[in-house]
Image (cartoon, helix red, strand yellow):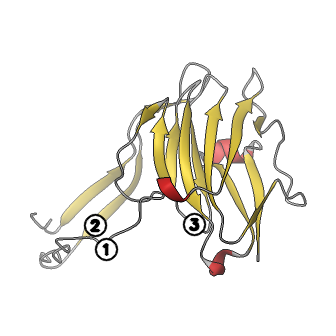
Amino acid sequence: MQAAGPGTYALRTAQFSTGPQGNHYAGVVLATVRVAGGAVTPIALPEQLLPVADLRGAVTGRRTIVFSETDDGDTLFIDGRTFDPNRIDTRVALGAIEEWTIRNASGELHDFHIHQTHFQVTEVNGVPQRFDGYQDIVNVPVHGAVKVIIPFTDPVIVGRFVYHCHLLSHEDKGMMATIEVTP
C-alpha cells in the first residue's frame, strides 16, 4: 500500500441507478480534500480478524419483511406501512436469533440496515452465501429477496430502535420501521 502525498484530491460518488422504477444518480464531486505536510505511512492491518460464529445452526425464529412502494415511488413501505415513530412494528425478546427474509416487491433496488446490531447474510435470491462474517447493510435486489440472521443477544440493545432502507430518500419517504428488544 502506497501513502498519498501532499496535493488536492476529489472525493467522488459513483454513477448509480436504483433500477427501472427507481432513481438515476450521476457521479458528482462531494468534496475536495487538500493534503499538506509529509506523507504518512499507513498502519498495518492485522493479519487475522477475530473469529465470529456462523449463526445458521442457532436460529430461534423466522419472519418476513416486505419492502414496497407506490407506482410513482413517492411513498415507500415496510410491510405495507409507512414509518410512524409512535408505533412498534416488531417485538423481539433479548436472546433471540432470528432469520429474516427481506423481500423487495418493487422495481427499484433497496437495501436493508438495522441499528444496534449486525447480521449474517445467508441467501440472496435463493442462492446460499458463504459465511464471511457479519454486516450491517445488504442490498435487496429488484423483485428479489435476501435472508439474514440477526442475533438479538447483546443486552446493550434492549430498547427501541429502527430498521430501514438505507437510501436516505427512501427512508424519508416512509421505508423505516421501529423494533423493540425486550429483556
Name the N-terminal-most of marks 1 and 3: 1
Q: Residues within 10 Å of mark 1 (few under 14, many from 20)?
A: few
| Residue farthest toward the left in the current orientation of the protein | 2
Does any portion of residue 26 appear in the rendered image?
A: no
Q: Earlier in the sequence, mark 2 or mark 3?
A: 2
Q: Amino acid at mark 1?
A: Leu
Q: Secondary structure at mark 1?
A: loop
Residue 71 is situated, as x and y percent measured from the top left of the image, at 75, 20
Q: Toward which corner of the image does residue 58 lie, by quadrant?
A: bottom right
Viewport quadrant of the C terminus: bottom right
Q: Position of residue 54 (x, y in %)?
A: 42, 59
Select label 1 or label 3 by which is in front: 1
Label 2 sits on what residue type? Arg
Name the residue carrying label 3. Answer: 117
Reading the image, the residue beneath label 2 is 34
Quarter containing the N terminus: bottom left
According to the image, label 1 marks what residue? 50
Observer-nearest of 159 and 129:
129
Image coordinates for residue 10, horizontal then vertical, percent: 30, 53
Q: Quadrant of residue 65?
A: top right
Residue 146 in the image: state x and y as whole percent.
54, 38
Look at 13% across and 68% down and name the residue there. Answer: 5
Q: Is residue 133 left or right of residue 91?
A: left
122 vs 172, nearest the viewer: 122
Picture layout, residue 178 above or below residue 93: above
Nearer to us: label 1 or label 2: 1
Compute the Cα span from label 1 to label 2.
35 Å
Give the residue at the far right of this rendering. 86
Q: Residue at x 61, y 69 (%)?
A: 116
| Identity of the residue drawn at 62% across and 63% down | 115
- Residue at the image position 15 percent from the left and 65 percent from the top: 4
Residue 154 is left or right of residue 158, and the answer is left
